[in-house]
Structure formats: structure tokens, C-alpha cells
Image (spheres, helix red, strand yellow):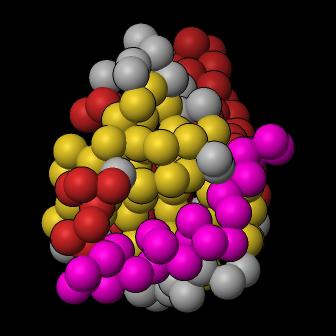
Amino acid sequence: LPTASNNKTYPVHLLELIYALNTVRNALATFSFFTSPLESPKMSWQEYVNSSLVGSGHLDKGSITSAAGDSVWATTPGFTVQPDEMKNVVAALAGGDAADKLWTEGIYIAGERFVVFKAEGRSIYGRKGREGIVIVKTTQAILIGHYGDGVQAGNAASAVENLADHLVKSGY
């Protein structure tokens, strides 16, 4: 690169190009909006709901609770999962009789009954008409995403599962 001490002459257009590249490099290093929300280690739980769940464009409501189901960490306004509903979610994710009942009784989330069409390992997927829910358990949290009419279930599931993977990698 040209410096005052190397006494070389560079064409003006090359100097302008070098200046422009340095400006872009500095801008990228300065502004954090170029990074994915999942790359930020200091996001609040509400920011995860807002950007990674609802912000994905595939979910219209979301919630993050403790893995025990006894503490709501963040939720979309108006999306209230009742304590008894969370108790059933926790029991179903643990397996046994509660998991078996999912297939006959469905699962209730925010006062609505969803027919379960997938329940394995850490995940429960349910549907009610053209809307549905995706529930995924991590080490320390339970994520619930709700999607509406016109959204493909696979896209909604990916949004919740991807956030769950990120949280597991981060120790949550």
C-alpha cells in the first residue's frame, strides 16, 4: 500500500480504489447489523423470540420458558401458555404415559388444542386446521413457536429447531 516513506507514485484511480476498500472494511468491522441474530452472544430472551422466531417470517407467535416449565423467559404479547399447559408439555417431553397421551388427546397451548402429528426426542409438532405449533426442548429451555395459515410446517419447524440448536451449542 502507498505510504509517505516509499516514494512510489500510484495512479489516482488505484488510490481511490484502496481508499474505498478500506472504507468498506472499516464499516463492516464497525456495524453489527451485518451479523445474524444467532451469532450475537448477548441477545436477551425477548430478542430471540422477536428476531429468531417471529422475525424468521415463518412464525407469528413464540415463547421461551425454562426447561422445567415454571418460568416464562420471553413471549409474544398475547401468546400466554398456561402453567398447566406447560406442565403437560414438560411431562410429554419427558416421555412415558404423558407422551403416549399426546396421540389421543393432543396438546393444549395458549388455550387451543392441537392434534399432534410428530413427537420424538426433544420435539413435538401439532396442528389445528391450517395453523400449528412447534415445541422444542433444549438443555435449559423450551421453545414454542406458532405458525398461521399459509406457512409451511417445515419452514416453521426449521426456525424453532435452528434456534434450539444454537441455544444447545451455547450451553442452554
In the displayed structure image, the side of residue 153 where residue 148 appears, left or right: right
Q: Residue furthest right?
A: 77
In the displayed structure image, the side of residue 38 where residue 24 appears, left or right: right
| Viewer-nearest residue: 112 or 74 | 112
| Viewer-nearest residue: 63 or 172 | 63
Q: Residue at x 22, y 85 (%)?
A: 96
Q: Residue at x 63, y 26 (%)?
A: 20
Q: Residue at x 31, y 85 (%)?
A: 94
> What span is colored magenta in the figure?
76-98
In the displayed structure image, the side of residue 123 where residue 15 appears, left or right: right
Residue 48 x %, y % = 64, 56
Above or below, 120 against 47 in this view is below
Give the prevailing secondary structure in the magenta stretch. helix
Q: Residue at x 82, y 43 (%)?
A: 77
| Viewer-nearest residue: 108 or 142 | 108
| Viewer-nearest residue: 18 or 1 | 18
Above or below, 91 against 162 in this view is below
Residue 165 x %, y % = 35, 66
Q: Quadrant of residue 153?
A: top left
| Total marks in image | 0
In the displayed structure image, the side of residue 131 where residue 155 appears, left or right: left
Above or below, 34 against 131 in this view is below
Residue 128 x %, y % = 40, 31
Residue 74 x %, y % = 74, 62
